[in-house]
């Protein structure tokens, strides 16, 4: 068996991988990655939605090395703590103050951050004496992770099917998907029926049974689904009206991606809980975090005198090396004002993508971007390429042209490092257009 098959890849068709061979990436610098033959690629996807400050940052590398020497690890259980994780919590709470977050619990990745949020929501209502509030409402095409709880609130049906039955009491509603509106597909004007679908679900289930609504501000892995402007504010308001917690999953949208520090802020809302990972360290070391409002934390704090604590925590919660990497990463994001840069570059990416649509109206169904999160949705007007295969084809041609992007069905998605400059954005999108020319 070849070495390729010994490593069972995540979300990987191992037969296809064995046939094609893996694309070996050996090193990276700035917005570029290099394969093992030294060929350079623009990382148009930030690895996997996350290399926000770019690769090879000396100060993050040094922070990791220094922390590994001083204290590589020690638990945060049993009354122990370490300085970098306390400093990071402090920094995050400062950053998240406008979003109404006041406390943070650490884990290792996005799935664990979501799992933590779901469990906090469940126990919160038990503490409040409303144990029947246990259900979660989520949206179609939502991606929240792979662990059984996080998977249960996923709306990507293919990801869930093989593992059912999953968590009971999870209700899926329509996604706010402007180009695939399932509520009023024939209406030229958006009535935000998808926001009212959340209310309808709460009423159908009974508000007394619903713990929380979970939502990514932009549904990234669902195909960069950018909601209508007022959608999130309306959903947030509905949650408040029916005493349902609102969990913002900021694993992709956090740390500047949309041109604001967090997606919730970008859309003018304050959630009750917030999940983070990916951009929190720009991928230098794995780290997840779940932030909560004072009101949520205080329920647990008050109960701690008499009742059980929050019986949840990962061995590596508050890992000092991950915390040191996150602190150095956040220092770069702040010093270089990268969220502002993403806001300035957003219109550049958006108009470059829309120009592709103007020039290839038969092929491009939709082109859009919010900050440095972009989408190019395609179809083959001649019907040679089946639906679901076009994105992969274009992404392969773009790879051959030296640009890495992520295909999701027929959508080519863009999520470059936030350090990307205007000419590099033009170059990245030009590769998409050239690739289109190769299939036309
Ligand atoms: N939440 C969102 C919005 C994500 O996009 C992802 C992963 O892409 C996750 C959660 C899960 O994160 P991880 O893969 O780090 O477990």
Image: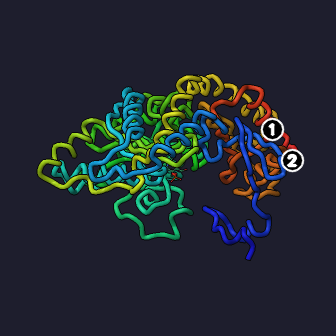
SS assignment at label 1? loop
Query: Where does label 1 land, which residue?
Result: 360
Q: Is residue 206 visible?
A: no
Residue 383 placement, left or right of 100: right
Q: Quadrant of the N terminus?
A: bottom right
Category of crowding for the residue at label 2, using alpha-carbon neighbours closer than 10 angstroms: few (below 14), some (14–19), many (at least 20)? few
In the depicted view, which residue is nearer to us: 62 or 338? 62
The residue at 70%/57% (across/down) is 388
The residue at 83%/47% (across/down) is 38
The residue at 19%/55% (across/down) is 308
Residue 332 x, y percent position in the rendering = 56, 28
What is the number of the mark on residue 440? 2
Residue 66 x, y percent position in the rendering = 53, 40
Residue 151 x, y percent position in the rendering = 46, 59
The residue at 73%/51% (across/down) is 391
330 is higher (above) or lower (below) than 121? above
Residue 236 placement, left or right of 326: left
The disc, 2 or 1, on the residue closer to the chain's N-terminal end is 1
Give the image quarter of residue 178: top right
What is the number of the mark on residue 88? none
Q: Is residue 152 visible?
A: yes
Residue 33 placement, left or right of 295: right
């Amino acid at each position: 068996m070849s070495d390729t098959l010994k490593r069972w890849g995540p979300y990987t068709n191992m037969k296809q991988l064995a046939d094609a061979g893996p694309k070996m990436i050996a090193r990276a610098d700035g917005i570029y990655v290099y394969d093992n033959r030294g060929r350079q690629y623009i990382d148009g996807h930030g690895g996997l939605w996350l290399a926000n400050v770019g690769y090879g940052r000396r100060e993050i590398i040094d922070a990791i090395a220094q922390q590994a020497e001083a204290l590589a690890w020690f638990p945060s259980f049993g009354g122990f703590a370490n300085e970098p994780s306390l400093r990071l919590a402090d920094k995050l709470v400062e950053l998240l103050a406008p979003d109404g977050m006041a406390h943070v619990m650490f884990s290792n990745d996005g799935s664990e951050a979501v799992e933590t949020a779901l469990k906090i929501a469940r126990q919160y209502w038990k503490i409040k004496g409303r144990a029947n509030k246990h259900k979660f409402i989520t949206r179609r095409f939502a991606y929240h992770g792979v662990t059984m709880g996080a998977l249960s609130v996923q709306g990507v049906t293919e990801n869930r099917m093989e593992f059912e039955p999953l968590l009971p009491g999870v209700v899926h509603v329509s996604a706010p998907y402007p180009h695939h509106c399932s509520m009023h597909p024939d209406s030229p004007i958006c009535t935000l029926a998808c926001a009212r679908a959340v209310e309808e679900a709460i009423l159908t289930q009974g508000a007394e049974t619903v713990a929380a609504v979970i939502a990514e501000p932009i549904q990234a892995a669902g195909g960069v689904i950018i909601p209508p402007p007022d959608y999130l504010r309306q959903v947030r308001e509905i949650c408040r009206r029916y005493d349902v917690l609102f969990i913002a999953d900021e694993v992709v949208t956090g740390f500047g991606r949309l041109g604001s520090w967090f997606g919730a802020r970008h859309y003018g809302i304050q959630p009750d809980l917030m999940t983070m990972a990916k951009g929190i360290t720009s991928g230098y070391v794995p780290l997840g975090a779940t932030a909560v409002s004072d009101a949520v934390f205080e329920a647990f704090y008050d109960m701690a005198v008499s009742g059980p604590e929050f019986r949840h925590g990962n061995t590596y919660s508050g890992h000092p090396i991950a915390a040191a990497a996150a602190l150095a990463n956040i220092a770069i994001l702040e010093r270089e004002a990268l969220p502002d840069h993403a806001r300035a570059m957003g219109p550049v990416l958006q108009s470059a993508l829309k120009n592709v649509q103007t020039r290839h109206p038969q092929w491009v169904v939709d082109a859009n971007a919010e900050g440095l999160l972009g989408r190019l949705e395609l179809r083959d007007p001649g019907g040679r390429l089946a639906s679901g295969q076009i994105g992969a084809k274009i992404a392969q041609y773009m790879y051959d042209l030296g640009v890495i992007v992520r295909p999701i069905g027929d959508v080519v998605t863009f999520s470059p490092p936030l350090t990307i400059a205007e000419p590099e954005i033009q170059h990245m999108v030009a590769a998409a257009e050239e690739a289109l020319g190769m299939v036309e």
